[in-house]
Every structure is written in C-alpha cells, then in structure tokens.
Amino acid sequence: MDKNNFKNIETKVGDKYVAEAMDKNNASIGGEQSGHIIISEALPVGDGLVTFIYCLKALAFFDTTLSKFKSENIEEYPQKLVNLELSTMPEENQIKELNNIAKKLSDKYDLDGRYLIRNSGTEPLLRVLIEAKDSNSVNEFSDELVNNIKNYLFT
C-alpha cells in the first residue's frame, strides 16, 4: 500500500466502523479481512457484485490479470486465528491488559507482524489473530500468547 501512496487507516472490526472512517477521511475504498469491501462512489455498504465489477474495471484499466496483479502487489503473511470459548466475555479493561501482555510477548519475539485480540460481536468467543512473516513465528507467538491469555483469564 505504501509503495502506491495509499493511506491505511485501521478501525475496529465491522463494516460500520470502516464506513465511518471512510466518511471521516474522504476515502474511496475500505474493507475488512473477511472480504467486505466498501466502494464509496457505488454504495455506502459492501456488495460482492459491485466489488467484482470494480475489480474487473481495474484489471482492464491496468491491462493485467488478477494473478499478475496479486504477485506484483500483495505480500501474504501466514496467520492463525484462535477462538477461545468463554462463559463471560472480558471487559474493556481486561482486553487492554491482554493487549499489554501481547505487546510484551511481541517485543520478546521481535514479531515482524501483528496481533489482534477482541471479543466476537456475534458469539461468546475471544478472538486472537496473529499474523507474521513466517509460520514458525506465528505458531510460537500464538501458542505462548494463548497460554498467557488463559492464565490471565482463568487464574
């Protein structure tokens, strides 16, 4: 994104937050990892058919194929999503403490990636997402992070 002078704005998970940030920053496109893409000139919400049409238009404009565009512009990182079933969801202050724990581990591992710890908006789950340049880092970091989260929440 940086090499093409795109500004990346991170929001809370959810189309609602993406749309709000797009409006606030006058952004033309926004989306989530789940595949929800919002193209502001077309619709104020995500729509798969609209996204598909705009992708085809972009490929035609740049006279390229999807596989060529992907290989030249997208660097994929391995990731792992751990869903922890909980009877009581952590409060905001507990999520902050879990993020402090994750930050310390991230520094310890010199993690070249990111992590996200959040309550699911639809299920009684704590979602822990880890993404890094190599799968060993993802697995080692996620194993220790999940153990630390369980220790914090259950002891």
Image (spheres, rainbow, N blue to C red):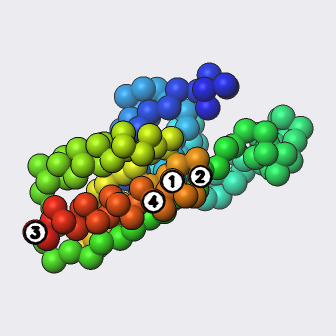
Label 4 – label 1 distance at C-alpha: 5 Å
Mark 2 closeness class: few <14, some 14–19, many ≥20 residues within 10 Å: some
Q: Quadrant of the C terminus?
A: bottom left
* Cβ atoms at labels 2 and 3 below 8 Å apart: no
Label 2 – label 3 distance at C-alpha: 32 Å
The answer to which of 33 and 150 lies nearer the viewer is 150
Task: Place residue 47 in its image quadrant.
Answer: bottom right
* Cβ atoms at labels 2 and 1 below 8 Å apart: yes
Residue found farthest to the right: 63
Question: Where is mark 3, residue-wise?
Answer: 155
Label 3 – label 4 distance at C-alpha: 22 Å
Kind of element beneath mark 4: helix
**Residue that appears at 60% across and 26% down:** 2
Question: Where is mark 4, residue-wise?
Answer: 140
**Is there any visible trace of residue 53 in the rendered image?**
yes
Mark 1 closeness class: few <14, some 14–19, many ≥20 residues within 10 Å: many
Question: Where is mark 1, residue-wise?
Answer: 137
Task: Place residue 114 in its image quadrant.
Answer: top left
Amino acid tagged 4 = Glu
Kind of element beneath mark 1: helix
**Residue that appears at 11% across and 49% down:** 93
Amino acid tagged 3 = Thr
Q: Is residue 96 left or right of residue 35?
A: left
